[in-house]
Structure formats: structure tokens, C-alpha cells
Image (cartoon, helix red, strand yellow):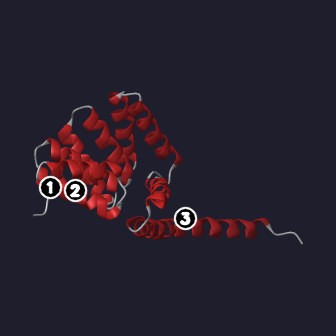
């Protein structure tokens, strides 16, 4: 029994619409579940959960935007901050609701010594994704550099609430405790 082409078009259209409208909700639910699991995970499971969250956060939903993110990060690895900023600026211009684009560009600005723009981008990234513990850690690092040790400690503490096995946040918090910040008497 052959299907008429116009019926097939309606079925395909309905399937595509279902995927488009259901996928963000599933990803959101999955992100929330992963964050809950991460906050109580063993050290062994934390690495896997961290990678799964990164896959969600790194996916803009657009192959072109994902490519810009990759190119920007590749340029950062090569210490070419100018090129990284160019790629990541194109990304934030074309996908302003994609939190990881702002976070990645904040990293590029920071590495270029452009702290004002880095803080602006971190603010935007965290407004879009307040649970991005890596962006919160970056904010803590910048606050520590500015000498605002109290708020840096709060940022590192927030990271550890979300991701108790975040090695860099644990080390940074320990460093602050040796300086007298966050120590209990």
C-alpha cells in the first residue's frame, strides 16, 4: 500500500515539529537532573556528569554556532586571543541567548587582559545559565584578582555546592582559607 506524498509530508512535518518543541524541554529536564546528581555524586561519577553537562551547555542548537564556539576555543588553545574574540563575538552576535558563547568570550577577554569586557560577558552568561559552575569559578578568579576575597570565596563556595568535586574551586577556596577568608573559628 503506497502512501500519498502529501500525507507523508504532513507526517514528517509533525515529527520535525515534535522534535523541535520537545527537545529543549527534555534537555532542560536532563540538565536539572544532572545538576542534582552532580551535587551528590561520588568523585568517580562527578567527571561523567560534568562531561554530560558540558555537552548540553556546549550545544547551541545550531551547527554553525557550534562551529564558531569550537573555532573560538581552538584559537584560545593556540593562545590566539584576537582570533578567539572574533569568532566568539560572531557567536554572541548571532546567538545572544546561548550562554556558553558569552562564557567562552569572557574567557578570551580575560586571557587578553580585558577584564571589563570579561566581567560583562560573565554577567550575561550567568544571567542565561546561573548554574554554570565554570562561569561562576571564572567570576571568583576575577574577584580574587581584584582583591575582593570575600566575594571570591562566596563564588567558589557556590561552585562547590553545584559541583562538590570541582578541583580548581576546592584549591582556590583552600588558598583563600589559608589567607583567612572563609575560615570558621
Circle 3 or circle 1, nearest the eye: 1
User: CB under 8 Å between callouts 1 and 2?
Assistant: yes
Instruction: Quote the CA–CA distance across marks 2 and 3.
Output: 35 Å
Q: Secondary structure at mark 1?
A: helix
In the drawing, does residue 67 fall left or right of residue 122?
A: right
Residue 81 falls in which quadrant of the image? top left
Could you tell me which residue is drawn at 44 percent across and 63 percent down? 42
Instruction: Quote the CA–CA distance across marks 1 and 2.
Output: 6 Å
Q: Secondary structure at mark 3?
A: helix
| Residue 96 shows in the view | no
Circle 2 or circle 3, nearest the eye: 2
Residue 153 falls in which quadrant of the image? bottom left
Of labels 3 and 1, earlier in sequence is 3
Q: Which residue is mark 2?
A: 155
Could you tell me which residue is drawn at 63 percent across and 70 percent down? 14
User: Where is residue 56 drawn, in percent x and y?
Assistant: 47, 57
Mark 3 neighbour density, 10 Å: few (under 14) some (14–19) many (20 or more): few
Q: Secondary structure at mark 2?
A: helix
Q: 31 or 5: nearer the eye?
A: 31
Could you tell me which residue is drawn at 13 percent across and 63 percent down? 184
Of labels 2 and 3, earlier in sequence is 3
Could you tell me which residue is drawn at 46 percent across and 45 percent down? 65
Q: Which residue is mark 1?
A: 151
- Where is 19 relative to 133, above or below? below
Q: Which residue is mark 3?
A: 20
User: Where is residue 99 drawn, in percent x and y?
Assistant: 36, 53
User: Where is residue 170 drawn, in percent x and y?
Assistant: 29, 53
User: Where is residue 117 drawn, in percent x and y?
Assistant: 22, 41
In the drawing, does residue 177 fall left or right of residue 112?
A: left
Q: Quadrant of the C terminus?
A: bottom left
Amino acid at each position: 500500500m503506497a502512501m500519498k506524498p502529501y500525507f507523508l509530508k504532513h507526517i514528517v512535518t509533525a515529527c520535525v515539529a515534535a522534535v523541535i518543541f520537545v527537545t529543549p524541554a527534555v534537555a532542560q529536564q536532563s540538565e536539572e537532573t544532572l545538576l542534582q546528581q552532580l551535587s551528590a555524586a561520588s568523585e568517580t561519577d562527578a567527571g561523567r556528569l560534568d562531561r554530560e553537562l558540558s555537552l548540553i551547555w556546549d550545544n547551541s542548537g545550531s551547527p554553525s554556532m557550534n562551529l564558531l564556539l569550537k573555532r573560538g576555543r581552538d584559537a584560545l588553545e593556540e593562545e590566539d586571543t584576537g582570533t578567539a574574540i572574533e569568532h566568539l563575538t560572531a557567536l554572541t552576535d548571532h546567538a545572544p541567548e546561548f550562554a556558553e558563547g558569552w562564557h567562552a568570550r569572557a574567557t578570551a577577554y580575560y586571557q587578553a587582559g580585558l577584564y571589563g569586557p570579561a566581567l560583562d560577558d560573565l554577567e550575561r552568561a550567568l544571567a542565561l545559565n546561573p548554574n554554570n559552575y565554570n562561569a561562576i569559578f571564572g567570576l571568583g578568579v576575577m574577584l580574587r584578582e581584584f582583591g575582593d576575597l570575600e566575594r571570591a570565596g562566596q563564588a567558589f563556595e557556590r561552585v562547590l555546592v553545584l559541583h562538590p568535586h570541582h578541583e580548581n574551586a576546592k584549591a582556590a577556596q583552600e588558598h583563600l582559607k589559608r589567607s583567612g577568608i572563609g575560615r570558621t573559628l
